[in-house]
Amino acid sequence: IPNGIAGAKYAQAPIVAEYNDKNVIGFLGRFEEPRKGLQVLLDALAIVSRFAPDIKLLIAGPGDSAEVLNNVDSQLRNRIKFVGQLDDAQKASFLRSIPIYVAPNTGGESFGIILAEALAGGAAVVASDIPAFTAVLENGKYGKLFKSEDSTDLAKVIIDLLRDRDSRDAMANSGQAYAQKFDWDVVAENIFEVYEMAIVGNGKVGVVS
């Protein structure tokens, strides 16, 4: 039984026009933590920008944005925007608005709940092939996987999605429908079924004297 999300909150969140441009990709997390993989994404952005001059990376979450920008090539800085730490409603709108969500995490994730939330919002999801993310995306069936910590492979995946909008939209639609399995209504029902089976099973156990 997976972790649950409030699926409707993401699917019905207000769209922010600024975030909804076709060449926008988004990242959400504590970006100063190396395991969140922002540096992998920034390295990929340098490659992607050669093929997509209008690419824009939106970074949401807590951290020192000035420090990050100081370590980024000056020619890339105008392609990056930090939107700060988001509350629950803002997070839902962020994931509802961005066309592509990238999760470049390098490890330490027990479950990719952020992927489920991004899928529910309707974003096309790109994620590293760490076990937790591979499981949520069912080996790439509902999102694109790239080799963890490989910025070149990530760049290729992003470029392909930017070039083929029809495939990207189809994947996003499929992912959004799939995300319903993570909705709390479905998850709660599965939990109740497990308890019911446990109670029935317990009632059939005889007492050995």
Image (cartoon, rainbow, N blue to C red):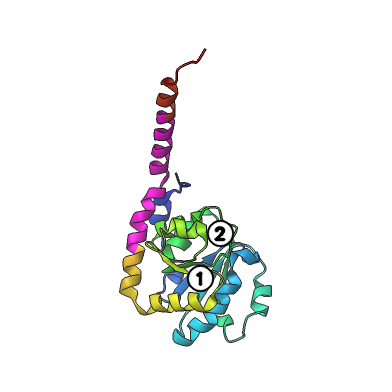
Residue corresponding to mark 1 = 147
Point 44% across, 44% down: residue: 1
Residue at the extreme top of the image, as rendered: 209
The spot of residue 173 in percent (x, y) is: 33, 62
The spot of residue 195 in percent (x, y) is: 44, 31
Q: Which quadrant of the figure has residue 186?
A: top left
Q: CA distance from mark 2 to mark 1?
A: 29 Å
The spot of residue 74 in percent (x, y) is: 62, 85
Residue type at mark 2? Leu
Residue type at mark 1? Lys
Residue corresponding to mark 2 = 86
Point 42% across, 49% down: residue: 182
Q: Can residue 90 be seen by looking at this rendering?
A: no
In the figure, is residue 33 to the left or right of 183?
Answer: right
Q: Is residue 184 magenta?
A: yes
Point 42% across, 59% down: residue: 137
